[in-house]
Amino acid sequence: MKIAVAGGTGVAGRPTVEALRALGHEPVVLARSAGIDLVSGKGLAEGLAGTDAVIDTTNVSTMSARAAMRFFEATTRNLTRAAERAGVGHIVALSIIGIDRVPYSYYKGKLRQEEVLRDSPVPVSILRAAQFHEYPVQFLAQSKGRFLVVPKMRTQPVAVREVGATLARIATGSPVAMSELAGPREEVLADMIRQVVRARADQRRVIEVRLPGAAGKAMAAGGTLPHEPGPRGTQTFAAWLREQQASETL
């Protein structure tokens, strides 16, 4: 099968492309680096020509609910319309577990994405995934100063490699309206970050705080834990951390 991956150069997109190749399929990367802009729709028709399915792993870096909603509204509408015109038979979208329970700004954008997908003329599968094992590394890269203030949050993290493999498997099968992918074990975000800090011999101190308001309460209470049936990853965060240390990629 020829399968397009929107956001195929991103954190979740790259392992999805690799998983498709490993299964013997032909991935097509839809990204600005390939001359395709999902926000404007430029290049989408050419990118989707002859494809059987498309996997949407697009992302945007913003703390603004309004900006996130605008981004996902535009990209999802452009993608679904272009997919219909190209005769694509299946759209698979990567979402996040708990976006309907945790009123966090970015999650409002993902909810808007799912709303647009419900009106898609092309059959859709939505995979809600838990936070990635890779998230603490991303958090540290964006944090400055001696003290790391981390929101109190229960999560059941999953390796992004397993997310990519699951997206590839769904794309090559029949549509599944909604499923949730989480890892094998519940973790506390602050503890995950502390483990990465220790592994790096980082001197910064992790301080866990509950975010104010309904979003912070929901995160602390387990709002991002899986509530629905679906696939489960097998690699624990501890095993992932050992793997990163062994390969010196932490």
Image (cartoon, grey):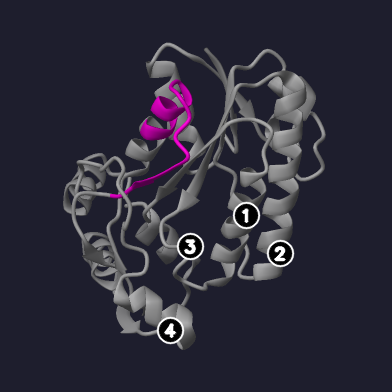
In the rendered structure, which disc, 4 or 2, sits on the residue that comes first in sequence? 2
Q: Looking at the image, do the residues carrying marks 1 and 2 touch, with CB atoms under 8 Å apart?
A: yes
In the rendered structure, which disc, 1 or 3, sits on the residue that comes first in sequence? 1
Residue 41 in sight: yes
Q: CA distance from mark 4 to mark 3?
A: 16 Å
Residue 178 colored in magenta in the image: yes
Q: Secondary structure at mark 4?
A: loop
Q: What are the residue bounds of the magenta stretch? A: 166-182
How far across and down, in percent of the image, does residue 102 sit? Answer: 46, 71
Disc 1 designates what residue? 60
**Residue type marked 4:** Leu
Q: Looking at the image, do the residues carrying marks 2 and 3 touch, with CB atoms under 8 Å apart?
A: no
Q: Residue furthest bottom?
A: 212
Depth check, mark 4 against mark 3: the one in front is: 3
Q: Residues within 10 Å of mark 1 (few under 14, many from 20)?
A: few
Q: Which residue is drawn at the image coordinates 22% and 60% (left, top)? A: 199
Residue 59, placed above or below residue 163? below
Disc 4 designates what residue? 211
